[in-house]
Image: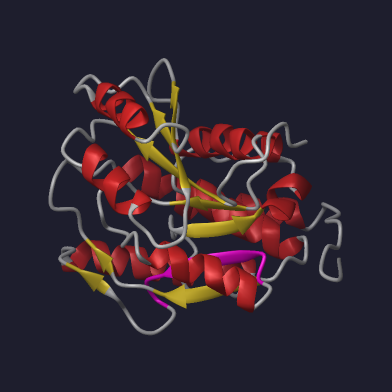
């Protein structure tokens, strides 16, 4: 499927919408890592000029920063699916996803990548809850909502993951090649649950690495009750559908 061989073996997909306060800084921080990685930004027609900032960084870092501009807000899940396909077509071995607002520490990208290599993991999750609750500056209500949502997902689906809604993940390309990306149903944060659950059902090795999640300082959160509702109620359907679906076994490949 690869059409080119990039200099870096790792790509980081960063969806952005109205992230003018963070766009330049997050790109600089990721590209300053000791291991070379490339960045793919998915911008959903941000009215605040985010895309223009990314384009300036494309000139500053030729060949290392890439941009897909979309017509409007089409959902987090569709942004990542489009990004996954782009990264597969461009030959990356490790494909990561992270937020633009520094809630995920860019330095932890190297921990996710090294875990995939050293532990031969297929999916590595930067987990807020695998070693307690490692969340900084979130309101207590939101912490509890997120923590118990993951507990709920684990109970309903049997997915042995503590942070099922985590958006800080590293995938080996073979996972994304095996999954039918066009069949991923959810568009909001439940997309994160569905990807982890499907990879697990395929037999891929899923590992959690503890991280410290820090609430954004600049910009506005995109979380809302509708997104949360999709995650809660969609999980039941996800589990139900799985009872009647055959999953290819990739555990020994």
Q: Is residue 140 left or right of residue 85?
A: left
For residue 95: magenta?
no
When the figure is inspected, residue 48 is found, relative to residue 156, above or below; the finding is: above
Which image quadrant: the N terminus? top right
> Magenta stretch?
121-129
Horizontal and vertical percent for residue 188?
Answer: 45, 41
When the figure is inspected, residue 54 is found, relative to residue 129, above or below; the finding is: above
- Looking at the picture, tell me which residue is in the foreground, 202 or 227: 202
Q: Is residue 195 left or right of residue 240?
A: left
Q: Going 26% across and 21% down the picture, which residue do you hit?
A: 52
Tell me where residue 67 sits by quadrant.
top left
Give the colour scheme of this rendering: secondary structure
Q: Going 28% across and 23% down the picture, which residue do you hit?
A: 46
When the figure is inspected, residue 170 is found, relative to residue 77, above or below; the finding is: below
- Looking at the picture, tell me which residue is in the foreground, 171 or 145: 171
Q: Going 26% across and 71% down the picture, which residue do you hit?
A: 135
Given the current orientation, which residue lies at the most extreme bottom position? Answer: 131
Figure label count = 0
Given the current orientation, which residue lies at the most extreme top position? Answer: 71
Tell me where residue 104 sits by quadrant.
bottom left
- Looking at the picture, tell me which residue is in the foreground, 97 or 215: 97
Horizontal and vertical percent for residue 36?
Answer: 47, 54
For residue 123: magenta?
yes
Q: Going 61% across and 69% down the picture, which residue do you hit?
A: 116
Q: Is residue 90 left or right of residue 14?
A: right
């Amino acid at each position: 499927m690869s059409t080119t061989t990039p200099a870096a073996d790792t790509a980081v997909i960063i969806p952005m919408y109205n992230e003018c306060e963070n766009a330049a800084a997050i790109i600089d921080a990721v590209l300053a890592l000791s291991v070379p990685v490339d960045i793919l930004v998915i911008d959903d027609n941000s009215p605040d000029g985010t895309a223009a900032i990314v384009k300036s960084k494309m000139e500053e870092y030729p060949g290392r920063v890439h941009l897909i501009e979309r017509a409007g807000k089409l959902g987090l899940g569709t942004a990542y699916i489009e990004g996954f396909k782009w990264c597969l077509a461009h030959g990356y071995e490790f494909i990561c996803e992270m937020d633009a607002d520094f809630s995920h520490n860019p330095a932890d990208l190297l921990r996710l990548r090294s875990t995939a290599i050293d532990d031969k993991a297929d999916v590595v999750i930067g987990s807020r809850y695998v070693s307690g609750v490692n969340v900084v500056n979130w309101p207590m209500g939101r912490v509890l909502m997120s923590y118990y949502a993951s507990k709920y997902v684990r109970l309903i689906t049997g997915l042995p993951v503590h942070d099922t809604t985590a958006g800080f993940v590293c995938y080996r390309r073979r996972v994304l090649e095996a999954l039918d990306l066009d069949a991923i149903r959810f568009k909001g944060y439940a997309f994160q649950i569905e990807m982890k659950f499907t990879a697990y059902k395929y037999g891929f090795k899923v590992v959690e690495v503890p991280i410290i999640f820090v609430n954004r300082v600049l910009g506005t959160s995109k979380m809302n009750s509708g997104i949360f509702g999709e995650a809660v109620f969609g999980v039941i359907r996800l589990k139900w559908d799985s009872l009647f679906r055959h999953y290819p076994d990739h555990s020994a490949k």
